[in-house]
Amino acid sequence: MDWSKGYEFLDGELEKITVDAKTGRRYTDKLVKVYYQDGTEERLLIHVEIQSSPKPKGIFARRMLTY
């Protein structure tokens, strides 16, 4: 990444495409515009998953598949 060019969070754009998602609004997902060293512009989808308690086997895997 070329951090000298900065980065931009595109949460508004992400909200537009996920507003009708079956799983509802996702506050932990972030869409970020960044630049590579060669000047190429890229968008990264960053997903943070927090699981605070044990769940039955397979639930976590199914949730990740949904994302």
Image (cartoon, grey):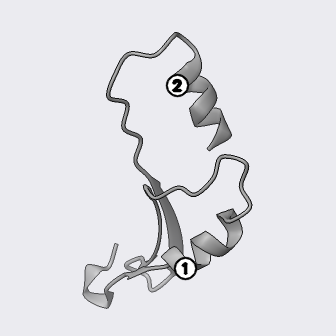
Q: Disc 1 marks which residue? A: 12
Q: Secondary structure at mark 2?
A: helix
Task: Inspect the image, locate mark 2, and give the three-letter code of the amino acid beneath it.
Answer: Phe
Decide: few, some or many residues near mark 1? Use Cα within 10 Å; few <14, some 14-19, many ≥20: few
Q: How many marks?
A: 2
Alpha carbons under labels 2 and 1: distance apart: 27 Å
Above or below 56: residue 21: below
Task: Inspect the image, locate mark 1, and give the three-letter code of the amino acid beneath it.
Answer: Gly
Question: Residue at point 43% right, 82% down?
Answer: 38
Image mark for residue 49? none
Q: Disc 2 marks which residue? A: 60
Question: Residue at point 40% right, 48% down?
Answer: 48
Q: Position of residue 26 (x, y in %)?
A: 53, 55
Q: Position of residue 35 (x, y in %)?
A: 42, 80
Question: Residue at point 37% right, 79% down?
Answer: 37
Nearer the observer, 53 or 66: 53
Decide: few, some or many residues near mark 2? Use Cα within 10 Å; few <14, some 14-19, many ≥20: some
Nearer the observer, 44 or 16: 16
Quarter containing the C terminus: top right
